[in-house]
Image (spheres, rainbow, N blue to C red):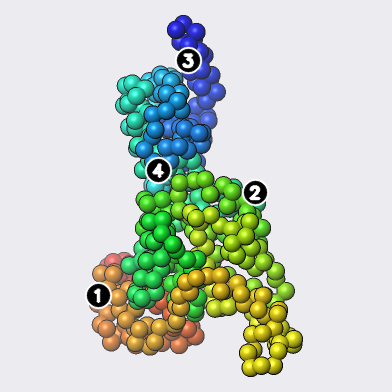
Amino acid sequence: MEWFDKFLDDLILYHTEAVDGTTLIGEAVRFGWQGNLWHCHLTLSLLADENPFSLACERRDPVRDSLYELALRDMEVFVKLFHIRLDNPILMDFRHESPVSATPRALRITGLAKALAEAETPQALLDKLTAYYKAHGLGMLGMGQIFRVDGSARLYPVENRREVRLSDLVGYESQKQLLLENTLAFLDGKRANNVLLYGDAGTGKSTSVQAIAGEYADRGLRLIELYKQQFHLIPSLLTQLKSRNYRFLLFLDDLSFEENETEYKHLKAVMEGGAEAAPENVRIYATSNRRHLIKETWHDRDDMQHDGDIHRSDTMEEKLSLAGRFGLQIYYPNPSFEEYHTIVRKLAERDPSLAAYSEAQLRSLAATWQVRHGSRSGRTAQQFIDDLLCHTQESEESAHADP
């Protein structure tokens, strides 16, 4: 059909004229692209477009319906676009080394761009694209694992974060097992609880949650970090999430409320099962140094009933009931003296440069460190190892510098 061929030619001309070399280089530096920047730009366009067809294919096999046929016609345009050669050869084989270039998001875009460019037919291109949608998803959620929220409830991925695994956290095996079992049930579509990880500072509560998110991202698990001043955004956020084919953890780190703060009421509304309740693909994971989340004062108890139950005050009951919304509560205590030294020893064993230290030396130095820092925790142990590594490296550099 001549009219359709002309339409394709006009559409291709529009795409190529709308994107110049400056735009491509700017995107390459921002996103960490390597290779053919034109192909990377087209690939990002396909992955970022959350349309009815792409959403229907998100982490699912495509259905060959009318939407599929329309998408196949669109691929006729993109096959021609992928085979366009730019005048500037640098844009066809761009190289720019930066920390961004090594991020999973950058590697995924450049790798997929090469695969899509090899497709010779619209059907081959669509098959590769839908296979990607099924494996990784699309849009912003398909390009990251951990997200934060802006003032308009829009998600943006956390880049360049330190990768952590549950095995990185020494000890707390029973706590990690409880968290893992609940998360796997959630991923399998079974009944799962909201989780409160509470206990002493530096014991690995946040690390446990972040590790879970990283290890199960390939199964569609996404972590969204929220601050308590953002709790009023939760209803808008849930509206976005409930129709997506992912499993979401709303992560409330270091959650606590002072006497006059009322943000906890927004959170209770979501967890109580009312109109704003979280959908089945969303759970809330929170960490706190306080089991009851909210600071109690003697003033809260002024109107209590004197029947031996100190939590009968209406004010206190309203506050303390928030913790009760978490069906699974996991306690992370400070390690004992021996557990602390076990953590130190296992952390030291991970770095060969500390092999010269005997267990007795590590024990003595670690004991002095925790006394000086006034705490005994996994975080204190890691800080001690980091300091030890720093001094070890300085000694090695000094030895090499001596004639």
Left or right side of 318 for 3 = left
**Which residue is label 3 attached to?**
8
Which of pointers 2 and 1 indicates the residue nearer the eye? 2
**Which residue is label 2 attached to?**
152
Indicate the secondary structure of the residue bearing disc 4: loop
Which image quadrant is residue 133 in? top left
- Sequence-first tag of 4 and 3: 3
Comparing 390 with 99, the one in front is 99
Q: What residue appears at the point 50 percent right and 66 percent down from the top-left corner?
A: 194
- Sequence-first tag of 2 and 4: 4
- Sequence-first tag of 4 and 1: 4
Which of pointers 4 and 3 indicates the residue nearer the eye? 4
Eyeballing the image, is 356 above or below 309? above
Mark 1: few/some/many CA within 10 Å (<14, 14-19, 20+): few
**Which residue is label 4 attached to?**
59
Which of pointers 3 and 1 indicates the residue nearer the eye? 3
**Amino acid type, residue under disc 1 in the picture:** Ala
Q: Dividing the image into 4 quarters, which one contains the N terminus?
A: top left
Q: Which mark is residue 66?
A: none
Which of pointers 2 and 4 indicates the residue nearer the eye? 4
Q: Are marks 4 and 3 in contact (CB under 8 Å)?
A: no
| Mark pair 4, 1: CA separation | 46 Å
Q: Are marks 2 and 1 in contact (CB under 8 Å)?
A: no
Question: Could you tell me residue 324's position as x and y percent?
Answer: 56, 74
**Amino acid type, residue under disc 4 in the picture:** Arg
| Mark pair 2, 1: CA separation | 51 Å
Mark 3: few/some/many CA within 10 Å (<14, 14-19, 20+): some
| Mark pair 3, 2: CA separation | 37 Å
Indicate the secondary structure of the residue bearing disc 1: loop
**Which residue is label 1 attached to?**
355
| Mark pair 4, 3: CA separation | 30 Å
**Amino acid type, residue under disc 2 in the picture:** Ser
